[in-house]
């Protein structure tokens, strides 16, 4: 793939296990992907408890994961959200706290440093300038190869203003002009969860941001109280290979289900490699067979209407029982990934991955 494509574990709800993350390093390396970024919303020390010291155990685990990724030839990154740091003066105390985290990331070994200010209050006329001061300051102190900033308004989706206040006039344009040129910016597209990406839109936003966007693709992510009721397994569509020309990189926010997320990820690889010859139906079956086995791939194709469209709330108890019976035999498969994928389906049917509104708001 000419376009640098990777994964950002940036969802709400139950995060992946450390073992799943290490397995992903090998999966990504073996299939032509370029990076993995650790950014689960459930890690409080990366978000709402960022002012507290990072536990030694967490730093050790991240250092081990960084070493594993690098040994596989995959860039390792973190997505760090100093929650609402810009609402208070960026004084000596705030700088000392932020420097503490940057020092930890430098020790861990971070190739991509994501400084995330998404999903926070934003209706302040000084928002852009306050954030620019913080980001440029951090960029000069991080040893990461690349710093990627996620602005508070990372899409034109009206839902962001509904949740976080009206976007200040000229916000994105000011970021584009005054952020350090080496800083990249995350962008999710015209919507928070964009169904497609047009070349014209990406070309236009590149002009606004003063640089090509680092795409944060919110498919197949299924976090939140509504989306957690569905498994987004279908092949990537609406992402033409030609859009890569207007991207700094393409990061995919996956599902809470690590093994199943590999299926749409592999179809994105196919989309970039095959261009206009890309066939989503064929790509899905190929990817599902590679992740699981040909038999389970065909079964998944058959059950897509229930898993993707109907969802948990519309499945009757009998339908759930039937589906669990269908996938239970795969739990004893000799292939670990097949068993993992089947376990994720049966756990999902049992309600393991349900994200409540209260949990969503507290992470």
Image: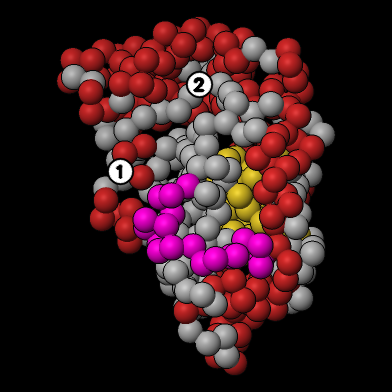
Task: Work out which quarter of the rendered image holds the N terminus and state it.
Answer: top right
Q: Is residue 59 magenta?
A: no
The residue at which mark 2 appears reads as: 234
- The secondary structure type at the circle numbered 2 is loop
**Which residue, as the protein is rendered here, is positioned at the far bottom?**
92
Q: Quick one: 302 or 70, which is closer to the camera?
A: 302
The prevailing secondary structure element of the residues shown in magenta is helix
Q: Quadrant of residue 313?
A: top left
Q: Nearer the viewer, residue 296 or 332?
A: 296
Q: Quadrant of residue 108?
A: bottom right
Residue at x 73%, y 42% (from the top left corner): 203
Queried whether the magenta region covers residue 162, the answer comes back as: yes
* Extreme residue in the right direction: 2
Residue 56 position, x and y percent, is 54, 71
Give the structural element (helix, strand or loop) at label 1.
helix
Q: Residues within 10 Å of mark 1 (few under 14, many from 20)?
A: some
| Residue ID at (69%, 15%) | 278
Report if residue 249 is visible in the image. no
Identify the magenta region: 157-175
Q: Position of residue 348 (x, y in %)?
A: 33, 31
Q: Where is 89 relative to 115, above or below? A: below
Query: Which residue is rendered at x = 30% and y = 43% of the image?
Result: 225
Q: Nearer the viewer, residue 121 or 293?
A: 121
Numbered label attached to residue 225:
1
Mark 2 nearby-residue class (10 Å; few <14, some 14–19, many ≥20): many
Q: Quadrant of the C terminus?
A: bottom left
**Total count of labels:** 2
* 142 or 65, nearer to the observer: 142
User: Are the two marked residues, 1 and 2, in contact with CB atoms closer than 8 angstroms?
Assistant: no
Tell me how far mark 1 sits from mark 2, CA to CA. Answer: 20 Å
């Amino acid at each position: 793939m000419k376009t640098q494509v990777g994964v950002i574990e940036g969802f709400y709800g139950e995060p992946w296990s450390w073992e799943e993350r290490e397995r992903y390093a090998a999966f990504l390396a073996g299939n032509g992907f370029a990076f993995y970024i650790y950014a689960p919303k459930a890690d409080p020390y990366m978000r709402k408890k960022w002012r507290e010291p990072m536990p030694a155990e967490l730093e050790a685990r991240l250092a081990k994961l960084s070493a594993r990724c690098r040994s596989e030839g995959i860039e390792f990154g973190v997505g760090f959200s100093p929650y609402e740091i810009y609402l208070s003066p960026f004084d000596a105390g705030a700088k000392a706290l932020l420097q503490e985290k940057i020092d930890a990331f430098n020790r861990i070994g971070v190739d991509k440093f994501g400084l995330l200010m998404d999903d926070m209050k934003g209706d302040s006329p000084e928002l852009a300038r306050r954030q620019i001061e913080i980001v440029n300051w951090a960029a000069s102190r991080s040893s990461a190869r690349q710093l990627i900033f996620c602005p508070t308004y990372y899409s034109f989706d009206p839902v962001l203003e509904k949740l976080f206040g009206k976007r200040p006039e000229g916000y994105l344009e000011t970021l584009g002009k005054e952020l350090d040129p080496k800083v990249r910016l995350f962008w999710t597209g015209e919507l928070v969860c964009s169904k497609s990406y047009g070349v014209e839109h990406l070309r236009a936003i590149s002009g606004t941001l003063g640089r090509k966007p680092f795409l944060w693709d919110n498919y197949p992510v299924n976090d939140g109280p509504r989306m957690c009721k569905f498994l987004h397994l279908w092949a990537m569509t609406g992402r033409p290979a030609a859009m890569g020309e207007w991207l700094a990189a393409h990061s995919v926010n996956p599902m809470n289900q690590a093994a199943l997320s590999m299926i749409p990820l592999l179809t994105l690889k196919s989309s970039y490699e095959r261009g206009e010859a890309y066939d989503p139906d064929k790509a899905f079956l190929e990817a599902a067979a590679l992740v699981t086995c040909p038999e389970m791939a065909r079964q998944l194709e058959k059950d897509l209407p229930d898993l993707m469209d109907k969802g948990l709330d519309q499945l009757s108890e009998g339908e759930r029982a039937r589906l669990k019976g269908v996938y239970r035999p795969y739990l004893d498969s000799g292939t670990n990934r097949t068993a993992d994928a089947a376990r994720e389906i049966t756990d999902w049917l049992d309600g393991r991955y349900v994200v409540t509104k209260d949990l969503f708001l507290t992470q």
